[in-house]
Image (spheres, rainbow, N blue to C red):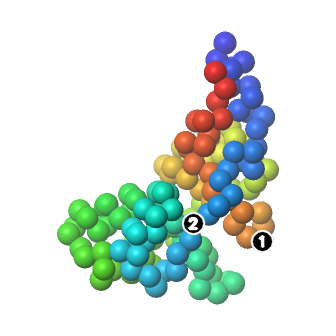
Amino acid sequence: MASKELGTVRFKKVSDVMHKDVATIDGSETVAAAIAAMRQKKVSSLVVNRRTQEDAWGIVTRKDIVNKIVDPGKDPKSVKVFEIMTKPMIMVSPGLALKYAARLLHHAGIRRAPVFDGKEIVGIISNTDIFNAIEV
């Protein structure tokens, strides 16, 4: 029974369920600015822009802010995003099957991954997006 209900998820691709509007921030911005942007855009993470074409993107999440700012008692106005972001980050291809994206997120211990088409970031996928793709 379970395999029949999950069949549609297995054949969907990341591009079918990803969010195409990716919120970004520069690493030189303060964590306070990141918090404001996340609240304003109603997102739980921001992709941190590359400094140069050869540089890697980064990501800052609510978890990063709670664990690296709130818990140690740091001032978000005095800490820069690049000091707490995760870099490099795991990315997925738009053509990846959702079942493999789910497996990657699970094994990597992450909740979301930017979608990279080989040239640029074209979206972001989260475990919530995959969960919502299950037809019951």
Mark 1 near mark 2, Cβ–Cβ under 8 Å?
no
**Image coords of residue 132 (percent x, y):** 60, 36
Earlier residue among tags 1 and 2: 2
> In the rendered view, does 73 fall on the left or right side of 57?
left
Q: Residue at x 68, y 37 (%)?
A: 99
User: Which residue is denoted by mark 1 in the rendering?
Assistant: 119
Q: Residue at x 30, y 83 (%)?
A: 78
**Image coords of residue 57 (percent x, y):** 59, 73
The count of marks equals 2
The label on residue 23 is 2
Foreground residue among 97 and 41: 41
Q: Residue at x 65, y 61 (%)?
A: 21
Element on which disc 1 rests: loop
Foreground residue among 112 and 129: 129
- What's under tag 2, amino acid-wise? Ala
- What's under tag 1, amino acid-wise? Lys
